[in-house]
């Protein structure tokens, strides 16, 4: 009898602990608190590139969906773009800096085999010393891996914040089919699990798919990527289907999102993705008009900045998120958003987020895009050569003038150490 009473009381207290744990987890639903974007100061209109390459401009504009391509000038690199996006974000959240306990950069255009971009950003921003910093790499999936790591970490450390940055420069060889799908930029996100309202929360489990394929890669000795273009598109679509089905199985439901955000190495890829997913989303509705209506109402509202920037590799998906936030002017109701993140090689994830009306003002993406300066093809080619010379230690530019509103500049390499200037107080930092 005594034994039974003891067993019952233990069961009751276990049940109570479990219930409390569930409630406390619900109170600390991790999410993205806010995000910001940094882009190179210059862009190349793709009509000009098409003319220079003897290609019908409609192939780039309509066939690939690319209108403009962000181009880095000397002084801009993966680190300065990452630090600029995070700097903007932290300027809007001045109390957040001291709470950052994790700084992760998702990138596939790292600047050193050993030293991560994250520690350079940590130094430039003056983040706390009690902070874990590292980079995550898996092609364009890196930022999603970083985000998922941060979401799990903040659940364990709800008083702290995680800074997640996607930063990349997409480089293909000149005259190659990939050339018009280059681009660059960075998206910084603050991830939290405290009681302040999230911009985006993630109440569902993700669908995952990994498979070893040689569709796109960049050997250590290469400055530009190698891509088996057509094969990479097949790998992407196969991974999308597999990750989507895994999502449905794990959550025992088919998602009914208001919007779809797809990784966009070039904007038309998102059209292809939506069209290939449509038979699974709505098996009984095969009408073309239904498909086109879905595309324009559920996909295109997020894709507008990608058309004007090109490929950000890890940041492409999150640039679309910034685009969707701007499209949904407040006040709007919370929207379900489906994300598909694909990293060649490959690892991919299909996940669902709840996008809440943005409680804060932010740097308008439209204004960031409009502040850029167009360049011609000879200038684009000269920038590529000058940035390569800086990266490979052939030259340095210690007195390089900062670009407008550029908080940090890359000046070259001295004694094998990268040199950055903090333009906000003119200090040279050797990283
Ligand atoms: N007017 C309008 N559309 C045109 C056109 C014209 N004059 N000429 C071609 N097009 C269309 C084609 O029909 C095609 O569209 P579709 O795919 O819907 O059929 C599109 O433009 C591209 O043309 P294509 O001949 O396939 O181009 P390509 O052989 O030069 O290569 C890629 C295209 C995408 C393979 C190439 O740009 C690439 O390798 N990009 C990088 C791939 C990548 O990022 N992979 C990573 C996946 S995450």
Image: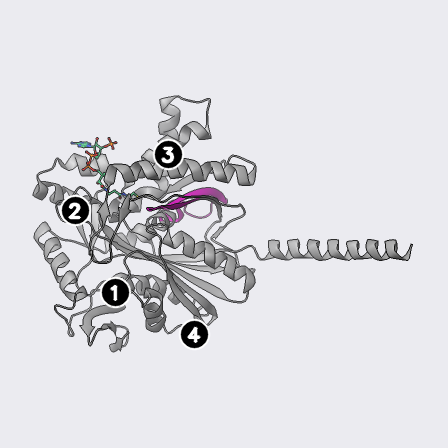
Q: Name the residue under label 3.
A: 274
Viewer-proximal residue among 389 and 235: 235
Which stretch did the figure color magenta? 323-349
Under tag 2, what secondary structure?
Answer: strand
Query: Is-magenta flag for residue 311?
Result: no
Q: Which mark is residue 128?
A: 4
Q: Earlier in the sequence, mark 3 or mark 2?
A: 2
Quadrant housing residue 115:
bottom left
Residue under numbered circle 2:
45
Picture quarter containing residue 194?
Answer: bottom right
Q: CB atoms at circles 4 and 3 under 8 Å apart? A: no
Q: Does the residue labelled 1 lie within 8 Å of ligand 1?
A: no
Q: How far apart are labels 1 and 3 at the CA level?
A: 37 Å
Categorize mark 1 by other alpha carbons within 10 Å: few (<14), some (14-19), many (20+).
few
Q: Residue 16: where, in percent of width, then height?
A: 74, 55
Badge 3 local density, few (<14 within 10 Å), some, or many (20+)?
Answer: many
Mark 2 packing: few (<14 Cα in 10 Å), some, or many (20+)? many
Q: Nearer the viewer, residue 186 or 349?
A: 349
Residue on which disc 1 sits: 405
Whole-angstrom CA distance, mark 1 to mark 4, is 25 Å
Residue 399 in the image, given as x and y percentages of width and height: 15, 74
Distance from label 4 to label 3 (Cα)?
A: 42 Å
Q: Is label 1 in contact with label 4 (beta carbons under 8 Å)?
A: no
* Res. 73 mark: none
Question: Looking at the image, is mark 1 or mark 3 earlier in the sequence?
Answer: 3
Task: Name the secondary structure under disc 4.
Answer: loop
In this rendering, the label closer to the viewer, 1 or 4: 4
Q: In which quarter of the image is ligand 1?
A: top left
Question: Would you say 8 lies left or right of 221 here?
Answer: right
């Amino acid at each position: 009898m005594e034994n039974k009473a003891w067993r019952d009381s233990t069961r009751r207290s276990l049940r109570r602990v479990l219930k409390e744990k569930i409630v406390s987890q619900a109170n600390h639903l991790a999410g993205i608190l806010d995000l910001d974007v940094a882009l190179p100061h210059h862009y190349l209109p793709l009509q000009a590139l098409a003319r220079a390459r003897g290609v019908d401009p409609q192939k780039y504009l309509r066939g690939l969906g690319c209108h403009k391509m962000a181009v880095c000038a000397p002084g801009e690199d993966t680190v300065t773009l990452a630090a600029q996006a995070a700097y903007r974000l932290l300027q809007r959240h001045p109390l957040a800096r001291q709470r950052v306990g994790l700084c992760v950069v998702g990138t596939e255009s790292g600047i050193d085999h050993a030293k991560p971009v994250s520690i350079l950003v940590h130094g430039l921003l003056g983040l706390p010393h009690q902070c874990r910093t590292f980079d995550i790499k898996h092609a364009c999936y890196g930022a999603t891996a970083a985000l998922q790591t941060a979401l799990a970490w903040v659940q364990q450390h709800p008083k702290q914040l995680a800074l997640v940055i996607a930063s990349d420069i997409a480089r293909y060889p000149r005259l190659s089919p990939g050339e018009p799908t280059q681009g660059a930029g960075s998206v910084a996100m603050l991830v939290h699990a405290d009681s302040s309202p999230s911009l985006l929360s993630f109440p569902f489990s993700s669908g995952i798919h990994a498979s070893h394929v040689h569709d796109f890669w960049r050997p250590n000795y290469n400055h530009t990527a190698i891509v088996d273009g057509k094969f990479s598109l097949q790998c992407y679509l196969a991974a999308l289907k597999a990750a989507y089905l895994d999502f449905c199985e794990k959550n025992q439901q088919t998602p009914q999102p208001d919007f779809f955000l797809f990784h966009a190495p070039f904007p038309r890829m998102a059209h292809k993705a939506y069209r290939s997913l449509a038979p699974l989303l709505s098996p009984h509705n095969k009408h073309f008009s239904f498909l086109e209506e879905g595309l324009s109402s559920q996909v295109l509202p997020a894709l507008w900045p990608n058309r004007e920037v090109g490929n950000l590799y890890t940041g492409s998906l999150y640039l679309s998120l910034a685009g969707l936030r701007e499209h949904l002017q407040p006040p709007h109701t919370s929207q379900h958003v489906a994300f598909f993140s694909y990293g060649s090689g490959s690892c991919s994830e299909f996940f669902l987020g709840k996008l809440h009306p943005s409680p804060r003002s932010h740097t308008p993406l439209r204004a960031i895009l409009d502040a850029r300066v167009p360049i011609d093809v000879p200038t684009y080619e000269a920038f590529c050569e000058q940035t390569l010379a800086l990266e490979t230690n052939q030259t340095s530019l210690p007195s390089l003038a900062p670009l407008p509103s550029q908080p940090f500049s890359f000046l070259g390499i001295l004694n094998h150490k990268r040199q950055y200037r903090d333009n906000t107080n003119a200090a040279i930092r050797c990283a």
